Amino acid sequence: MIELRPEPLAEVRPPVPKYLQEGYFVRFTDQWPDTLPNIKSGFFKIRKTAQVPYDLSYILPTNDYRDVDLSNSSGGENIYPEATRTLYEVVLGFKPGNYLSEFFIPAGEFVSRLEQAGMVPDVTHATRKYLGTIKPEDSPYDDKRLFLYFVKDLEPMIMRLYVDLGIDFEKCVVGLLINKCSIEKMTSPTSDQLARAKVIQYYTELRW
């Protein structure tokens, strides 16, 4: 549901599509909740896709942050699908600047953390404000490497943008490419299709 893909170490020829495409397969694990029965343990074929670019921009003072709700909740940015047969593959890239990002799902629950008690991102702490954060150079605006996967009625994902010390104000620009995927459920996938499917984990699987 959230992946930061590293810069490729080698070029592939012929090139491989970066995003989900028509005819691709996706599989949701059995850890998805019973409240999303159409998704849990489901196997789907992508019928068609459409890519929608969208930029989010905020000006923040130094040593301050803003929480951006990416969901369709009241006050959110409405980056979630509304149809049960739609999957959004959202790819994020950041324009250069003196700021960091971190993610929560649901609100208050960090995606990144370590096992020792208290080792979670904390914008008020001198060092833990850098724990698990993503810098603009980690996923550049023109080479987006941060992938998010959203379905209808998923809990809200919060993106926290934090401006580090050393500048009075910073313009934080987040570029999104929303890859809208129309998905069709398959009840009897072959072993080859299962092997080729993109596995989409629930967020609880990422916090171990």
Image (spheres, rainbow, N blue to C red):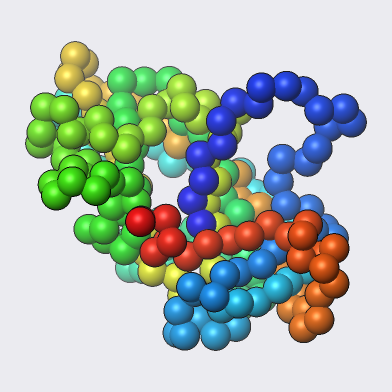
What's the residue at 46%, 22% (across, down)? Answer: 137
Residue 132 to residue 33: above or below? above
What x and y, as percent, mark residue 168? 18, 18
What's the residue at 47%, 27% (across, down)? Answer: 138
Q: Horizontally, is 194 left or right of 155 in the view?
A: right
Q: Horizontally, is 178 left or right of 132 in the view?
A: right
One can see residue 181 in this view: no
Query: Viewer-proximal residue, 199 or 146?
Result: 199
What x and y, as percent, mark residue 64? 17, 34
**Quadrant housing the C terminus:** bottom left
Q: Across the whole image, how many numbered discs are drawn on residues? A: 0
Query: Viewer-proximal residue, 19 or 142?
Result: 19
What's the residue at 44%, 41% (across, down)? Answer: 56
Residue 4 to residue 52: above or below? above
What x and y, as percent, mark residue 136? 42, 26
Q: Which residue lies furthest to the right in this view?
A: 14
Q: Horizontally, is 90 left or right of 134 in the view?
A: right
Q: Horizontally, is 139 left or right of 108 in the view?
A: right
Instruction: Give the image quarter of residue 195.
Output: bottom right
Residue 108 to residue 171: above or below? below
Instruction: Give the image quarter of residue 87.
Output: bottom right
What's the residue at 45%, 36% (across, down)? Answer: 174
